[in-house]
Image (tube, rainbow, N blue to C red):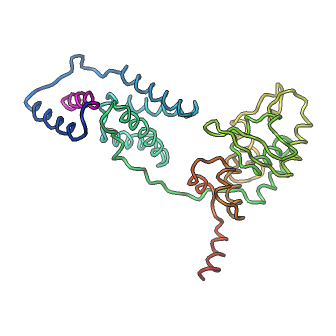
Amino acid sequence: MKENLILDVMQAMLKHLDNAKLAQLKQVLEQTLTAYDVCRNDGSVKKGDDEDLIEKFISAKRIEGCSEKTLKYYRVTIDTLVSNVGKNVKYIITEDLRKYLTVYQNTHQSSRVTIDNIRRILSSFFSWLEDEDYIIKSPVRRIHKVKTIKNLKDTFSDEDLEKMRDGSNELRDLAMIDLLASTGMRVGEMVLLNKDDINFSERECVVLGKGAKERIVYFDAKAKLHLQRYLNSRTDDNQALFVTLRAPYERITIGGVEHRFREIGNRLNIYKVHPHKFRRTLATVAIDKGMPIEQLQQLLGHQRIDTTLHYAMVKQSNVKAAHRKYIG
């Protein structure tokens, strides 16, 4: 309780004292309170304070342009921490967070990637609290990025893509396969497309990506023909580019696309067929054929080029050939 009292005093003086004077104040308070027993009048954690701070943080991230899906993930992650630690967020220290992350990982059998995602969100929250002078220093500062194992991600072979094209019983599925394979767009971007968004003469369309940012993507002649055949076969008046196969022909969802592709993969005995694999395949092929990484970054809609490099794998056969050419 003494530590909390000292923190309260120091936080109240944040706007009036520099770091050196705050450190001196802390030392004086610690020495002065050594001979005293300290207790809080109400004896409880003020939950309302936490909720208010979390709401202000979420509002700040919303203004920055975070999607509602991301904001929900932020809120759940922070709420879970607070409910498990049992402290007011102003009093949470580094050791509390280390213990929480360790217990969370053991209880949920979470991967290192998941734990680092939690650490990253908490770092954003506590850094915001520090910047806004609600706390003196973020307790996440001394918790470093979790080292993750970088596994080589699978991509589709040319044979896989042809098997899916030949094995598609529906014009819609064939059009989705070719559109994803030739544009590299995200599945979430594809399901938002309307018929009017497609420019067939230029073989391009504008998609709404992460952070509500628009960009142009391009599709090949094969995708154009299959899209036109699919749209000409439709009898509904829904403006969505892709709809369900049965009435009332509603816009297809991300879950619907994922489920359909799993069915195709299981039927054709193709390993792990999911929408994002088309995006990774395009990135790998583009890099393999010499597409400048900056242009690929633009095509995929990545803010950071590091993300593009994470998607794009260089084929091992080409590494071997390059080794023989330049070294061996």
| Residue 13 on the magenta span | yes
Q: Nearer the viewer, residue 10 or 193?
A: 10
Disc tally is 0
Residue 247 vertical placement versus 324 (above, below): above
232 in relation to 143, above or below: above
Residue 260 in the image, given as x and y percentages of width and height: 75, 40
Instruction: Answer with left or right where residue 150 lies relative to residue 249.
Output: left
User: Which contiguous range is marked in magenta?
Assistant: 1-15
Instruction: Tell me the residue at 83%/40% (across/down).
Output: 172
Pick the residue in front: 269 or 54.
54
Between 277 and 133, which is closer to the camera in this rendering? Answer: 133
Q: Please state the horizontal and vertical placement of residue 198, each as a whole percent of the image.
A: 82, 40
Looking at the rendering, in which quadrant would you find the C terminus?
A: bottom right
Residue at horizontal 61 percent and vertical 77 percent from the top: 323
Q: Is residue 225 magenta?
A: no
Task: Give the quadrant of residue 282.
Answer: bottom right
Left or right: 182 in relation to 141: right
Q: Indicate left or right for 113 with 240 as reference.
A: left
